[in-house]
Amino acid sequence: MNNVNGSDLREIVRVLVRNLGLLERNEACCSGVTLTQCHAIVEIGRSEEINLNSLAELLNLNKSTMSRAIDNLVKQNLVIREVHTENRRYIRILLTEKGYEIYKQIEKSMEGYYSNIISLVSGDKKDQVLESLQILVDIVKTNKFIDLKGE
């Protein structure tokens, strides 16, 4: 496979995303919220509290998009914005009790989904699959400057 190129990677990733159902399953796994809101809930739940800038950076979204998503989650009583007691300019974003329940549902659903997938990989290849995916994640994360036009 020394002749692998960008088209090969793109095709594999495209088919992987499609077949994992990430485009179609968001309603089923995200408990009635949008995919962006779903990702936000998961990241807030995992960090317990976060600010808007950190959340936007973590999800690789601009602040205005993230702010709209959080506004909608506030309206749905899933998150709260809270002024930090020691730094009034720092707005903490936390899950409400209802938001935390949805976070737990999402985590349980996705854990089961991905456990089923990895269980189908032969035992001696599981580490290889995870290592290869981690390499791609690290490259993409550290090279956000790559021109999408491929120039």
Image (cartoon, rainbow, N blue to C red):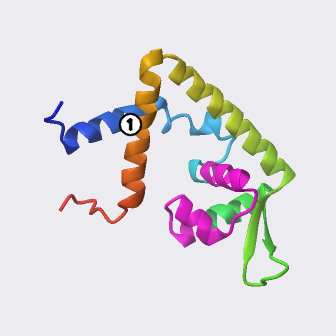
At x 80% / y 76%, what residue is drawn? Answer: 84
Q: Is residue 68 magenta?
A: no
Question: What crowding class fits label 1: few (fewer than 14 Cα within 10 Å), some (14-19), or many (20 or more)?
Answer: few
6 in relation to 61, above or below: above
> Horizontal and vertical percent for residue 99?
78, 50
Residue at the outermost bottom position = 88
The answer to whether residue 17 is visible is no
Residue 116 picture location, percent across and down: 57, 21
Q: Which element is circle 1 on?
A: helix
User: For this view, does 19 lie left or right of residue 80?
Assistant: left
Seen in the picture, residue 87 relative to 105 is either above or below; the reply is: below
Q: Nearer the viewer, residue 68 or 55?
A: 55
Magenta residue span: 37-66
Q: Considering the image in quadrants, where does the C terminus appear?
A: bottom left
Residue that mark 1 sits on: 132
Three-letter code for the amino acid on which mark 1 is drawn? Ser
Closer-to-camera residue (134/33): 134
Query: What residue is rendered at 74% in x and 75% in y?
Result: 91
Whole-percent x, y for residue 15 in the image: 35, 32
Question: For the point 45% across and 15% down, which residue is it?
Answer: 122
Quarter of the image for residue 2 reads top left
Who's the residue at 85% across and 79% down the image? 85
On screen, residue 30 above or below 82 = above
Task: Please indicate whether residue 121 sits to the left or right of residue 29 in the image.
Answer: left
Q: State whether residue 149 appears in this view.
A: yes
Image x and y of residue 106, in percent: 69, 39
Magenta: main secondary structure equals: helix
